[in-house]
Amino acid sequence: MTTDFPQRIRLSEAEALIDAVGARQRLSTIRIDCADALGCVLAEPVTAPIDLPVFDNSAMDGYAVCGADLDPARPVRLRLIGEQFAGPSKALSIASGECVRITTGAPMPTGADTVVIRENAIASGALIECRPGTPPGANLRHAGEDVRAGQTLLNAGQRIGAAQLGLCAALGLDSVMAAPRARVTVFSTGDELRATGQPLSAGEIHDSNGPMLAGLLASEGIVARRGPVLPDQPQAMLDRLRDAASDSDLLITCGGVSAGDRDHLPALLQQHGRLHFWRVQIKPGMPLLLGEIDGTLLLGLPGNPVAVLACFLVLGRRLIDRLEGVTGLRSQHFARLQRAVEKRHERLEFMRGVLRSDPDGVLRVMPDDATGSHRLAAASRANALIVLPEGPCMLEADTVVPVVPFGPVG
Ligand code: AMP
Ligand code: MG
């Protein structure tokens, strides 16, 4: 096998290649209905067509009054001239000495600039006694105080979350220019694999990576397609990958990328597709590769389950971000080690650990002793990867280390 592609690269080099290749293969953008846009990446900024709030309105239930009528020292009596509820404006107006019963979100009557909350007023017939203590201008939401028409609110390259969807709706927008979610097909590979529910013969194991990968993608808002389990047979692998490549934006495989006799993927990609890199100096996950088949990107994860987890979290998500057009990087998190860790080998390592937020406001992570990359039960006890730097080192308890959370932080 010739080696006209980067091999045994460092994590930072793999990240740079993923950024470059992912951006080059960036998905074309379309107009997407806001109802379908959760998790999509904006291709254009969102600019406000209107002010928010749209009009001056009451922040409380109470009485809309002229602030100048109120006396800071003694109660004042005002004449109730009408009611304005949240809903169609009655276009009421008040003069000095008058007030209007009002509810939260209702348009302010002309002439009113203050709301006395219900709890500070006593109604007796058409007279409303306002207790002292409401400063003029209180309990009002001004038009445009949150958003001014013309203001840019969301940026291109930003993912749309629930709050952003709410904002678009408040602005009256029903569609946005965005990338559709990447169409991802996941494949497990290996003659030893059986689906759950099937009895295991000697030498066989259940396919745990397939469901885990589908779950990891679902956590990113992507409903992955599950390809068939690929046998350790090059032609059959190629045929099935090609089938999926024709209508996928990304193929993710697991297994078959090491240097064993049955690890066909690197050579297959080299002969029939392309290899962008193979092998990254990380633990677990060393044999990881990025390639292409018929122009569709293929992220080849190793077979060991914990390697799948770590590689997807660190590099798979990054590739999806680039493909979908995210401009920024995901935020980094840091925590203090709850015990010392001695690292003897060269490669950067993703250890598993339990991350929790202490009452003193500090994030702490307890490393898990089970280090083998087949130890899925240990990984399922954990909620974060702990990033240990390249090179041998002794990290004392309390050392601040980067962490990659992947579950709820306790
Ligand atoms: P490979 O990289 O194909 O040599 O696989 C490395 C290890 O991961 C072997 O012990 C495989 O049996 C195991 N493995 C590979 N694929 C899966 C899978 N889908 N689910 C569970 N274990 C797997
Ligand atoms: Mg295998």
Image (cartoon, rainbow, N blue to C red):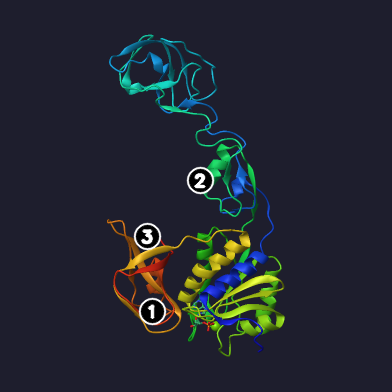
Q: Where does label 3 land, which residue?
A: 409
Q: Quadrant of ligand 2?
A: bottom right
Q: Amino acid at mark 2?
A: Ala
Q: Is residue 311 above or below residue 156?
A: below
Residue 224 appears in the rendering:
no
Q: Which mark is residue 163?
A: 2
Q: Which quadrant holds residue 254?
A: bottom right
Is the C-beta separation of discs 3 and 1 under 8 Å?
no
Name the N-terminal-most of marks 2 and 1: 2
Q: Which mark is residue 211?
A: none
Q: Which quadrant holds residue 270?
A: bottom right
Q: Where does label 1 land, which residue?
A: 371
Name the N-terminal-most of marks 2 and 3: 2
Distance (Cα) linking label 2 and label 1:
39 Å
Q: Which quadrant holds residue 80?
A: top left
Q: Is residue 123 above or below residue 41?
A: above
Q: Nearer the viewer, residue 140 or 241?
A: 140
Give percent across and percent down for residue 371.
Answer: 38, 79
Q: Residue at x 42, y 21 (%)?
A: 114
Instruction: For the C terminus, give its image quadrant.
Output: bottom left
